[in-house]
Image: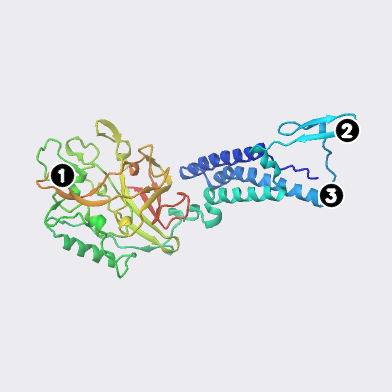
Amino acid sequence: MICHIGFNKASDIKVFAAFIFVGGLIYTYAMKGFANGFSPAETLFMLSFPSYFIGGSIILDIISVLIEKYDIPTPKINYDDITSNQYDQTNNENNIVTIYEDNSFSSKFKKLNIFEIIGLKLIIFAIVIYYLFPIVYFGFSDAKLPETANLTKNDYTELKINMPEDYTGFSKQKIYNIRETAVKNSIFYTKDYKPNEDIFGGIESGKHWWGIKSSVCSYHKDKTPDNTKGVSTVSKYIENPDLLVTTMFPFSNFIEYDKIGYCTAEYPKLIPTDLWYIKDKNLIVAKFPIDKKMLKARINWQGHTSPYFLNLTGLNARDFGYNYIFASKLTNINMMEYDNISKDDYLIRDYIHVGGSCKYPGGCNNISPHQTEFDYNINNLPAEITLKLWKKKPITPYKKADFYVRLVFEEL
C-alpha cells in the first residue's frame, strides 16, 4: 500500500491552493517592493517562499512513490481510526469490516493515484511559474540594466538633440515633412515610416501652437495672454523621435508668484542635455538638469498646495508602436496619484489636436491628454525613473520590455 505523505486528499489540495494564493500575495508584495527600492537579494528571498511551498509538496509526493517502489515499511492502518468520508461498521465476532464509500465531489480526489496527484501539481506549478515568475522563462531581469553612474563612453552611442522651433502658421504637410526628416535621422527609421494618423492626424494647417515659454510661465493678471509666442512646445517631441518618452511640467506657473527663478530659467523647458543609446540593452538614457530649489517649492494646483510635479509624454513611443508603459524603478521619485505606472502597465494615449487651452481665437495645436497616472515629483537629486515599453500589453509588467527608457535628473 502507499503511505502518501504529500497532498493527496481533497483537504490537502485546498491547502496546496492556499499555499499558491499566499505565494501570489508574497510575490506581488515583493515585486512592488523591488520597483520601489527592495534590493535584488531581498526580492529573491521573498519570492523563494511560494517556491518552497509548491516544490516541497511535489518532493513529498516523489518520496511516496519511492516508498512504494522499494517496499519501504510503512505504518499499518488501524481501521478503528477510519473517519470522515469513509465510515466503518465492524462485526467484532467475524472481524469483518464494511466500508461505505462517499461519492461526493471532494472524495473523488482520494481516488487519484500518486502519479495523477504529482501530474496535477506539476501543471499548477507550471501555471504559477508562467504567470508569477516570468524571469524563469524569459531569462531576464531588469536588474541587469546598467547603472547610470557606471556607464562609460564605450557603453553608449550619443544621439543628436534637436532644438525646438516655432511652428506658427505651418501647414500640416510641412509638419509631416519635418517629422519624416527627423525620423530618417533617428535609430527608429524604417523605409515605410509614415506619421501615425491617430497621433498626428488632428494637426490643423495654419494654426498657432502652444509656445514653450508660455507653457512654463505666464502672467496671472493678463486676461488675454498670447500663449503662442516663441518656439512651439510640441516641436521638441516631433523633432526628437529618439526621445520615446520624455517629460514636462503640465502646468503654466505664474510669473508674479515666482520666488525661485523658475520662470526665467531654461531647465523648466526640459530639453535634455544628453541622450544616450545602449543598443544591446534596448535602452535610451536622457539627462535633464534640475534646480534643487524647485524641490521644496510649492504651487497652487487646482485649489490645493502641491509640489512642482512633472508628467510623462510617450508621443514618440506610441508613434513607433510602443503602446504600453510601466515604471520599473524609481529613485528619489514619488508618483502623485494612487493609481500610477509604478503599480501597473498603462496604455499611452498621447496625440496632437486643436484645443482652446491656449486662449487664442480658434485654438492651438497641442498635445493631449493629461494622463494623471504619469504624474510624479522629484524629492531629491540625483533622481531617476526607468520605464519599460511594450508594443502589446504584457501578461505581467515584470516581463522583459521591448524597449527601455531612463530619465535622469541631475542638480543644476
Among numbered discs 2 and 3, the one appearing first in the sequence: 3
Q: Is residue 88 above or below residue 161?
A: above
Among numbered discs 3 and 1, the one appearing first in the sequence: 3
- Tell me which residue sits at (43%, 62%) in the image: 155
- Tell me which residue sits at (77%, 32%) in the image: 82
Question: Which kind of residue does numbered mark 2 sit on?
Answer: Asn
**Along the horizontal axis of the image, is 96 left or right of 132?**
right
Q: Is residue 164 above or below residue 262?
A: below
**Along the horizontal axis of the image, is 48 left or right of 231?**
right
> Disc 3 on helix, strand or loop?
loop
Visual colour scheme? rainbow
The alpha-carbon separation of the residues under discs 1 and 2 comes to 94 Å
The alpha-carbon separation of the residues under discs 2 and 3 comes to 27 Å
Q: Quadrant of the N terminus?
A: top right
Whether residue 78 appears in this view of the structure is: no
Camera-side mark, 1 or 2: 2
When asked about the image quadrant of residue 77, the answer is: top right
Q: Residues within 10 Å of mark 3 (few under 14, many from 20)?
A: few
> Disc 1 on helix, strand or loop?
loop
When asked about the image quadrant of residue 240, the answer is: bottom left
Q: Which mark is residue 45?
A: none
- The residue labelled by disc 1 is 356
Image coords of residue 72 (percent x, y): 84, 47
Q: Is residue 284 above or below residue 37?
A: below
- The residue labelled by disc 3 is 71
Front-most of residues 150 and 317 = 317
- The residue labelled by disc 2 is 95
Question: Which kind of residue does numbered mark 3 sit on?
Answer: Asp
Whether residue 72 appears in this view of the structure is: yes
